[in-house]
Amino acid sequence: MSDVLILLGSHSDLIITEKGQEILREFKVSYDLRIASAHRSPAFVEGLVSAFEKQGGKVIICVAGMSAHLAGVVAAQTNLPVLAVPVANAATAGLDALLSMSQMPAGIPVATMTLGKAGFTNGALFAIQIIATNDKILSDELIRYRKAQTTQVLESDSKNRVIFEG
Ligand code: RP5
């Protein structure tokens, strides 16, 4: 049983998921990553979403590029929270996918992250935050994660500070 279902529209999207997968593992949040296209394998997408709901899954992250319908199609089939991560392509730098995912009609919400690696990293963290609303250990881990992140910025500041006194 997995808490998070990650759906990728294509194997070519896998490259943006590395850091986010690392974070899910660091937080020990179980996930199942599948390749399933809204256009090329619609029935397979439907089956995966329905099976994930039945097994008690909590959050779905959809990653797709170009005319990115995956997240919207998935959100239409479930009341689970659906997070969307658009992937860039050479022709439009991903603006097509970003707009497609964020322009959902009222009634079927999708939480769209930014493009690419940063988007998937935030998608993973957002999924963890959703699960943490009902999990004190995870919530404490998130506090620790944020503190470590702040410490890194402060260290970077002290290493890179430049004072020019004219
Ligand atoms: C989308 O089309 C996928 O999510 C991918 O980002 C894009 C291109 O897919 P491939 O042609 O690389 O399989 O469905």
Image (cartoon, rainbow, N blue to C red):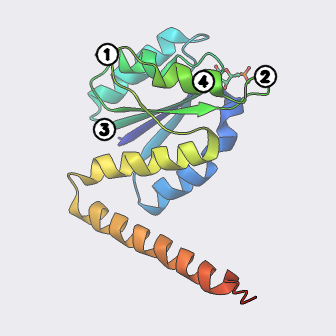
Q: In which quarter of the image is ligand 1?
A: top right
Measured Cα–Cα span from mark 3 to mark 2: 35 Å
In this rendered view, identify the residue nearer to me: 108 or 13. Answer: 108
> How many residues crowd mark 1 within 10 Å: few (<14), some (14–19), many (20+)?
few
Q: Residue at 30% across / 38% down in the picture?
A: 58
Q: Label 3 belongs to which residue?
A: 58
Q: Residue at 64% across / 32% down in the picture?
A: 87
Q: Quadrant of residue 93?
A: top right
In this rendered view, identify the residue nearer to me: 115 or 70. Answer: 115
Cβ of mark 3 under 8 Å from ligand 1: the answer is no
Q: Where is residue 158 in the image (x, y as percent from the top left)?
A: 61, 86
Q: What element carries label 1?
A: loop
Cβ of mark 1 under 8 Å from ligand 1: the answer is no
Q: Label 4 belongs to which residue?
A: 97
Cβ of mark 4 under 8 Å from ligand 1: the answer is yes
| Dot 1 or dot 4, earlier in sequence | 4
Farthest bottom residue in view: 165
Above-or-below relation of 28 to 111: below
Three-letter residue code for mark 1: Ala
| Dot 1 or dot 2, earlier in sequence | 2
Q: Where is residue 22 in the image (x, y as percent from the top left)?
A: 55, 57
Three-letter residue code for mark 2: Ala
Above-or-below relation of 18 to 98: below
Three-letter residue code for mark 4: Ala
Q: In this view, does 113 lie to the left or right of 77?
A: right
Q: Label 2 belongs to which residue?
A: 91
